[in-house]
Amino acid sequence: MAASKDPRPCSIADTLAVVGEKYSLLVLREVCLGNGRFDQLVRNIGAPRDILATRLRRLVDAGILVKQPYSERPQRFEYRPTRAGLELEPVLMTLMAWGDRHLRTDGDRPMVVEHSCGRALAPVVTCRACGDEVRHEDLRAHPQAPGWTVTGPAVA
């Protein structure tokens, strides 16, 4: 089957168009940790400088990061998360927890994030309305895009 020229309208795809490029989420990880200077980002991420500069520009343009001067001579900048960038931090924590569970078979965790309660963060997605933990079997999709059903384009 050939790829559709009009794929399903999807907020996940739209979000990945902004943060799904290689290194973008790692940039956000570092900036959320307080490491927003270019040299810190290069060192901690390992991305080539030109690619990192491109990712930073795109994240600033998308409103996920803000670029702020920290030195005038020489002129240097650091990056900080915007409100939209901070809204992605729980996604990073959930990805980290998934990686710890499924990719770290030795049980070694490269980083532990502590919650303000003093315990290691164990992120869980819950329903805001009822407070229950989100489980696959409890979800029902209701496509809102005209012409689409759960299984794909509606047949005319």
Image (tube, grey):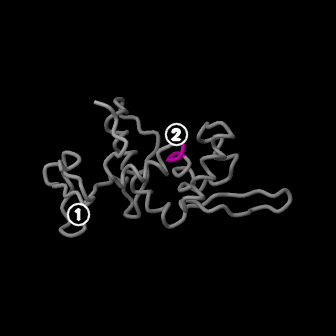
Question: Outermost residue toward the front?
Answer: 156
Residue found 28% across the figure and 30% down from its top: 1
Residue sitting nearer the eye, 118 or 156: 156
Element at label 1: loop
Is 36 drawn above or below residue 47 in the view shown?
below
- Residue marked by disc 1: 127
Label 2, on which residue?
A: 22
Direction from residue 76 to residue 56 in the image, left or right: left
- Membership of 135 in magenta stretch: no
Residue 100: % across, % down: 36, 39
Q: Which of 75 and 102 lies nearest the eye of the viewer?
A: 75
Viewer-nearest of discs 2 and 1: 2
Q: Position of residue 31 (x, y in %)?
A: 57, 54
User: In the rendered view, would you say 130 is above or below 49?
Assistant: below
**Residue at x 32% of width, y 35% of height:** 102
Q: Give the residue type at disc 1.
A: Cys
- Which amino acid, by three-letter code, is at mark 2? Lys
Dot 2 alpha-carbon crowd within 10 angstroms: few under 14, some 14 to 19, many 20 or more:
few
